[in-house]
Amino acid sequence: MQCADGIIISQGHATVLRPDREGKVAVLVSGPSFEDGIATAAITVSFPGTNKPGADRPLRAGESVSHPEVGTFTLLDVKLVETPPDQAGGGNFAVYCFRPSPTFDLDTDRLTWTKDQ
């Protein structure tokens, strides 16, 4: 799967990404794993502290979740991380393509996007 028109992001389970300059948008990844050999994860887009509707969907590789004000998130793959039994932490990473909407105020200090270069 390609991501020529977006940003490839790897994000761990239960971590929050704030992709906008003001930090009003939260992107949460849940349960990156493989089911029947296919990468799966849930991606949630929310606006913490507001009543603004977000977007949330369990995805399989190639599927997307979109929010009109933020953009489209397409699950590309899951990277498995093995943690030794005697160590805490770790977890798998969801790899997805983020295609920001045209009006989204992307934090380019945090996320490099070469679309306009």
Image (cartoon, rainbow, N blue to C red):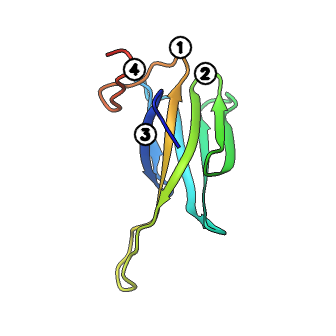
| Residue identified by numbered label 2 | 69
Q: Secondary structure at mark 1?
A: loop
Q: Amino acid at mark 2?
A: Glu
What numbered label is drawn on residue 103? 1
**Which dot, 3 or 1, sits closer to the camera?**
3
From mark 3 to mark 4, how far is it between C-alphas?
13 Å
Q: Residues within 10 Å of mark 3 (few under 14, many from 20)?
A: many
Q: Which residue sits at x=42%, y=42%? A: 9
Q: Which residue sits at x=44%, y=50%? A: 11
| Residue identified by numbered label 3 | 8
Upstream in the sequence, badge 3 or badge 2? 3
Residue 115 seen in render: yes
Q: Where 98 sits versus 93, above or below?
A: above
Q: Amino acid at mark 4?
A: Lys
Upstream in the sequence, badge 2 or badge 4? 2
**Which dot, 2 or 4, sits closer to the camera?**
4
Where is residue 65 shown, x and y percent of the image?
Answer: 65, 38
Upstream in the sequence, badge 3 or badge 1? 3
Q: Secondary structure at mark 2?
A: loop
Where is residue 61 shown, x and y percent of the image?
Answer: 61, 51
| In the image: residue 64, left or right of residue 20 | right
Residue 47 seen in render: no
Is the Cβ of the residue at disc 2 closer than 8 Å to that at disc 4?
no
Q: Which residue sits at x=39%, y=68%? A: 90
From mark 2 to mark 4, how far is it between C-alphas?
18 Å
From mark 3 to mark 1, how far is it between C-alphas?
19 Å
Residue 115, by quadrant, is: top left
What numbered label is drawn on residue 115? 4
**Which dot, 3 or 2, sits closer to the camera?**
3
